[in-house]
Amino acid sequence: EGTATKGTENGGAARMVGSVELDVPSIRDLAAWAGVPLEAPGRGLGPLRIAGKVEAMATLFTFSEARIGLDETTAEGDLSVNLAGVRPALKGRLDVDRIDLNTYMPPPDEGSQPGSAGASGGDQSGAQGTGAGGGWSDEPMDLSGLKAADVDFALTVGEIRMRDLKIGRSVLKVALKDGLLALDLDELNLYGGRGTGRVTLDARGAVPRVAKTFAIEGVQAGPLLADAAGFDRLEGTGRMDVSITTRGRSQKEMVANLGGKGAVKFVDGAIKGINLAAMVRNVTSAFMDAQAGKAQKTDFAELSGTFTIAKGILTNRDLVLLNPLLRLSGAGTVDLPQRTLKYRLEPKLVATTEGQGGTASARGIAVPIIVEGPWDNLTYRPDLAGVAGGIAKDPAKALKGAKDTLKQLKQGGSGLGGLLGGGSDTSTGSGTATDPGSEGGDSGGSLIPDPGKALKGLFGN
């Protein structure tokens, strides 16, 4: 229903000033009754409520002190609509309590939600890059609505939800013209962090294109990655600088066409599912007990690296992890379309408690580790071929590095010395990398009964 409280005419140009109230129980039902049923996906476009002061003059309409409700979203602000152009032009500001985009999106295929068991179907062939690709939706995205109007808006949103991803208070400018949408994020609150960014969505052509740039500080990696990509192996507080582009008609196509670059740095966190110090200490028990590995984790003071993305494949060559007992470097790839990962890590055991701010080039015996598989079922194994290759390539350097490590470990006390035979290890703990003796079932023995003698034997003297 609608009401107008006042109407005037001046010089033949009609002008109306008044108030309006509109209450539609269901937009979908109204459209069906009018003979133009809506085919829009999702369960939204139900009740619509509009109230405020209106002024209409020829092709220009203004709506002030507006109160708008659509489905479960409410908003307040001022709006104007100009109908003189090719498309309606909307301008104004809105303060929105929350936007749940899931309401207007098609339901995901069963098991395709990030983090669901169906993401990989339990198929271990994902380790070869074929078993985990079913998680991205190939449902065509309907972006025709971006060509329905031009928009120039200042928007404040208390919360935005898309699938499992939750974005906090955001202040952004929205510019939409002829199917090209630009969002400038002046304020973005995301999982404990704050930042800025820009998103453009170009729906002018047959294949939509997307570009994103973000700089976020203080974000909590664990819940962000779990909700955004179903990846729950990383904890910590970090900074991210990301610039990516993609194109595609569906979520699956867009992931496959991702390209760009970025840098990340996390502090005071952990990598879950692996205890690198235990692997250095006792290769046999650490790698063969898969069930025990699920409860393990590697704490870190700092984890950082840069990356590039091409055709959905993320490549990193400068991963660095600093831990009180470990220095780790690594390189590898993340196959985003297939949801798989393959990394080669080189941890070095060091006799120092200097973590964050320490050096990543500590000397010692490198025990390479291969991490690979689908995101929800990663496997770990020692790169024995890499160890043998390093010794064969430069035996003198390998021997010197081993001697340096032995010297450091002996100076570090009985707890560290016990790792390679320098003393007894009586530590117990929770199975994290800050306590390398807590996993593996070796309660005080060593990998090598007489490390010095064994190392000399490798080179014949």
Image: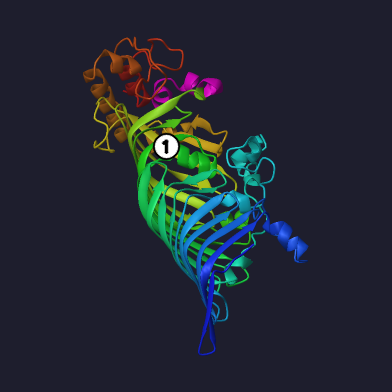
Find numbered disc 1 in the image and state the secondary structure of the residue it sits on: strand
Based on the picture, tell me whether residue 289 belongs to the magenta stretch. yes
Q: Quadrant of the image for the C terminus?
A: top left
Using the image as rendered, state which of residue 369 and residue 60 is in the foreground. 60
**Is residue 54 visible in this depiction of the protein?**
yes
What residue would you read off at disc 1?
345
Q: Does residue 357 appear left or right of residue 217 in this picture?
A: left
Give the percent coordinates (x, y) of residue 11.
Answer: 50, 90
Q: Which residues are magenta?
A: 276-292
Q: Which residue type carries mark 1?
A: Leu
Give the residue drawn at x 58%, y 66%. 208
Using the image as rendered, state which of residue 119 and residue 16 is in the foreground. 16
Query: Is 175 drawn above or below residue 230 in the view shown?
Result: below
Q: Quadrant of the image for the N terminus?
A: bottom right
Give the percent coordinates (x, y) of residue 261.
Answer: 42, 56
Query: Is 423 drawn above or below residue 111 in the view shown?
Result: above
**Is residue 216 visible in this depiction of the protein?**
no
